Image: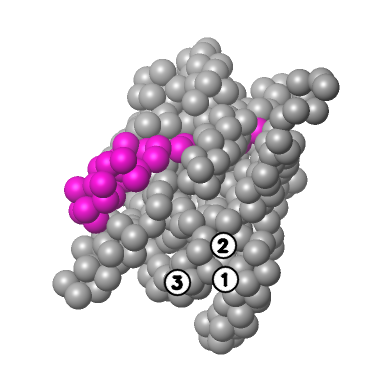
Amino acid sequence: MKEAERRPPVKPVKVALLLSEGAASRGGIGRIMANLDEELGERHPDIRARRHATRLTGRPVLNHLSTPFALARFAISCAAGQVDIAHINIAPRGSTWRKMLFARTARRFGAKLVLHLHGSAYDEWFHGLTPARRRGVAAFFQGADAVVAMGDYWARFLIDELGMPAAKVHLIANGVADRPVSPGSAEGAPPVLAVLGIVGERKGTDVLLAALASEAMRDRPWRAIIGGNGEVEKARRSAAELGLADRVEFTGWVGPAEVDAILRQADIYILPSRQENQPMSILEAMACALPVLSTRIGAIPEQVIEGETGLLVPAGDAPALAGALEKLLADPALCRSMGTAGQARQRRLFSIRTGADRFAALYRGLVG
């Protein structure tokens, strides 16, 4: 008998990836789970992942009313033996309270529990809770079989603030697929500044517009593309009041294809956020060999190496942002070297292949 014939068949590991709208989820978490789902299917056929929605619509009010129906659907999958591991993506506020229900359901049917901490300012939200609610959130995380953090900052928060045993905390960074180098703006055209994310205060849209309207930036050639939904009309009015209407384009919501199209024509990527975890858009920009200008918050300093792959400034500091941007625009060679270094760093540390391999190993370890 051949060796391959003597080996017992590999038992599949059935993983439920739980996120707000399941496969229809938008934003960073949606892209992360879509990438992971696809990469697991290609590289780890024994891992049978499936995305599950924790609400059936994103519309206000209706999203909460739809949760019991999504929970019932998930319970049916668990009862049918389709869930060995519930991989639950967690963000602040309603996401946490809603996901507690799905975690209890998974446990009731004997599934292992992996909590994946996303969402910006989870620490601030946690500290703003009443003592009783803080204890409830801490107990929720402590009861998991494993908790995934996307950087050292959040791993320390889980251990120091939520009381997680260090052995249960797994560092797995966000990952993106490799991309070709961005061609950048057309020869002779103004450099293109790309910004991706929800338009509003959290992402620092107001700070960016103030920096672009500064005296240092007014006399330089540039064009900015801001892709994302949110307070688009408010930002568009602010840009007009600052005299930037003809230089700043607001595209509204952008899907994966539009994101790639924006990054392909960009020369510099900017994310002036006030709150972040480990933003996917920075990794996507690094994958395209773009220099990154961002802020020193969350896990961003673990993504962007100051002076090597980009520049970092204090959150909310428009003059500092304008000064850093002026430095990049004045030195195309520096931008190219930072972009090259950033792409190498992304492929080494933030590849979706590496992330999928680490998740597959975690899943297999949990089911023994």
Report the amino acid beneath label 3: Arg
Report the amino acid beneath label 2: Leu
Residue 193 placement, left or right of 321: right
Helix, strand or loop at disc 1?
Answer: loop
First along the sequence among labels 3 and 2? 2
- Residue 96 lies, with reference to residue 181, above or below; the image says below
Pointer 2 and pointer 1: residues touching (CB < 8 Å)? Answer: yes
The residue tagged 3 is 104
Q: Quadrant of residue 317?
A: top left
Query: Depth check: 71 or 224 in front?
Result: 71
The residue tagged 2 is 19
10 Å crowding of disc 2: few (<14), some (14-19), many (20+): many
Which residue is at the far right? 1
First along the sequence among labels 1 and 3? 1
First along the sequence among labels 2 and 1? 2
Q: Is residue 335 visible?
A: no
Residue 54, disc: 1
Q: Quadrant of the N terminus?
A: top right
Residue 220 placement, left or right of 299: right
Query: Depth check: 66 or 74 in front?
Result: 74
Is 175 contained in the magenta span? yes
Residue 101, disc: none
Helix, strand or loop at disc 2?
Answer: strand
Query: In this picture, which residue range is highlighted in magenta?
Result: 151-177
User: Residue at 19% across / 48% down in the picture?
Assistant: 160
Measured as percent of width and height from the top left, residue 322 is found at 38, 37
User: Residue at 53% across / 69% down in the picture?
Assistant: 109
